[in-house]
Image (cartoon, grey):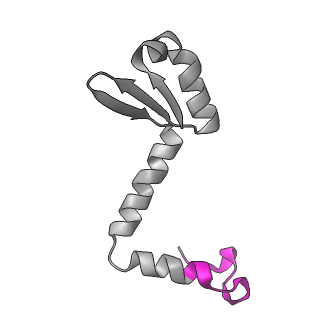
Amino acid sequence: MTNINITNFRKDIYELLEQTIKYNEPINISTKNGNAVVLSEEDYNGLMETVYLLNVPGMKEKLIEGKNEAIEECIAEDEVKW
């Protein structure tokens, strides 16, 4: 995570935002009233999806179970009924 004060953030905002988007590197901006964090949209969407999935009852356990299942026991993607 990049740490920067608000004055330097203002000075280099375009470059910093481009780096955040390109490399998904969050920026921690410090001000005299507290800090703020800037994330890429991709990172933000990933966090929101994680929060959503972990709030579905039983989903955490299903995800862990699926992660631990041997690939040979899984069905092929083209066999999945959506």
Which quadrant would residue 77 be assigned to in this image?
bottom right
Q: Residue at x 40, y 52 (%)?
A: 48
**Going by the image, does 54 lie left or right of 80?**
left
Residue 19 falls within the magenta-colored stretch: no
Q: Is residue 5 above or below residue 70?
A: above
Residue 67 falls within the magenta-colored stretch: yes
Q: Residue at x 51, y 37 (%)?
A: 26
Looking at the image, the residue that sits furthest to the left is: 33
Q: Is residue 50 above or below residue 46?
A: below
Q: Quadrant of the N terminus?
A: top right
Which quadrant would residue 22 be assigned to in this image?
top right
Q: How many marks?
A: 0
Q: Position of residue 10 (x, y in %)?
A: 45, 13
Q: Residue at x 40, y 66 (%)?
A: 53
Q: Position of residue 42 (x, y in %)?
A: 53, 43
Q: Is residue 79 above or below residue 24?
A: below
Looking at the image, the residue that sits furthest to the front is: 32
Q: Position of residue 69 (x, y in %)?
A: 63, 85
Q: Could you say which is closer to the camera, residue 4 or residue 58? A: 4
Q: From which residue to which does the magenta span run?
A: 66-81
Looking at the image, the residue that sits furthest to the bottom is: 73
Q: Position of residue 64 (x, y in %)?
A: 52, 79
Looking at the image, the residue that sits furthest to the right is: 72
Q: Residue at x 48, y 24 (%)?
A: 4
Q: Could you say which is closer to the camera, residue 69 or residue 29? A: 29
Q: Could you say which is closer to the camera, residue 77 or residue 35? A: 35
